Image (tube, rainbow, N blue to C red):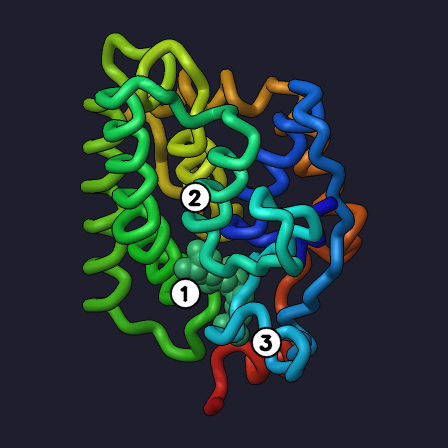
Amino acid sequence: MIDLHYWPTPNGHKITLLLEELAEAGAGLEYTVRPVNIGQGDQFRAEFLEISPNNKMPAIVDHAPADGGAPLSVFESGAILLYLAEKTGRFLPSDLRARNTTLEWLFWQMAGLGPMTGQYGHFHVYAPEQIDYAKKRYAGEANRLLGVLNHRLEGRRFIVGDDYTIADMAAYPWVGAYDKAPIDLAPYPEVMRWKASIAERPATQRAYALAREVNPDLGKPMSEEQKRVLFGPR
Ligand SMILES: N[C@@H](CCC(=O)N[C@@H](CS)C(=O)NCC(=O)O)C(=O)O
């Protein structure tokens, strides 16, 4: 049994995408969602910091770790994807080269696409002042990374090849993440094709339906109080 400490954001979606795929594949991994309402400051609670010291979700607690020991917690979405893929033997190829490629693109997402697109969203959607330099800088990086992904997808169904992997699950929620400041994907036809094929997977649809269940206010503008909690002095 896995406890998933979760709030519906792109980093949170990565883990529900995988857990729903695992459920469909019959991997025998049940999970319970433990909501962490980051707009009201749940991420700063002492119990949560015990498992996620960086005060960010997602995080998991595995109550049946492979070594048979005490419950094991994991924070950082990339580490969680890798942990669950290794635990179940799914969505991470065992072949040396395909595994290496999966990890390269997983880390590319964690260090590049996620942070740069996140800053793009911050300065275009949430920042209290319009800073042209920051907007241009992160729009440029987000577009550059989409170009890199587009090139990678040429001649490949998914990022690694024919099989859907944790590298795709990490990247997918960050492509087209901001309805209020959409990035035009027309220059990236391979990315559009790949995104549409993931969107239609039943597990993806269940993951995003769960998001709306956990936060019925999903998509509504953030209140000033929520912005203070998330972006104010800590
Ligand atoms: N590198 C982390 C980033 C996680 C992250 O940024 N989580 C955000 C929501 S998407 C969060 O919990 N923010 C709360 C806060 O900053 O106080 C990961 O991939 O897990």
Residue position marked by numbered label 3 in the rendering: 50
Going by the numbered disc 2, the residue's amino acid type is: Trp
Please indicate whether residue 66 sits to the left or right of residue 83 in the image: right
Looking at the rendered structure, the secondary structure element under dot 1 is: helix
Residue 65 visible in image: yes
Q: Quadrant of residue 27?
A: top right
User: Where does the image place residue 174, in percent across and percent down from the top left?
Assistant: 43, 43
Marks 1 and 2, how far apart in space?
13 Å
The kind of residue on which mark 1 rests is His
Viewer can see residue 7: no
Reply above or below: 206 against 43.
above
Give how far across and how far down residue 113 sits, in percent. 31, 46
Residue ID at (58%, 69%) = 51
Give the residue number, with chain letter if any, for mark 1: 122
Q: From the viewer's side, name the closer residue of 98 and 77.
A: 98
Position of the N terminus by quadrant = top right
Instruction: Measure the alpha-carbon separation of dots 3 and 2.
Output: 27 Å
Q: Residue at image x 50%, y 16%?
A: 197
Above/below status of 58 relative to 204: below
Q: Nearer the viewer, mark 1 or mark 2?
A: 2
Front-most of 129 and 99? 99
Numbered disc 3: secondary structure = helix
Q: CA distance from mark 3 to mark 1?
A: 27 Å
Q: Residue at x 52, y 49 (%)?
A: 10
Q: Which residue is mark 2?
A: 174
Residue depth check, mark 3 versus mark 2: number of the one nearer the observer? 3
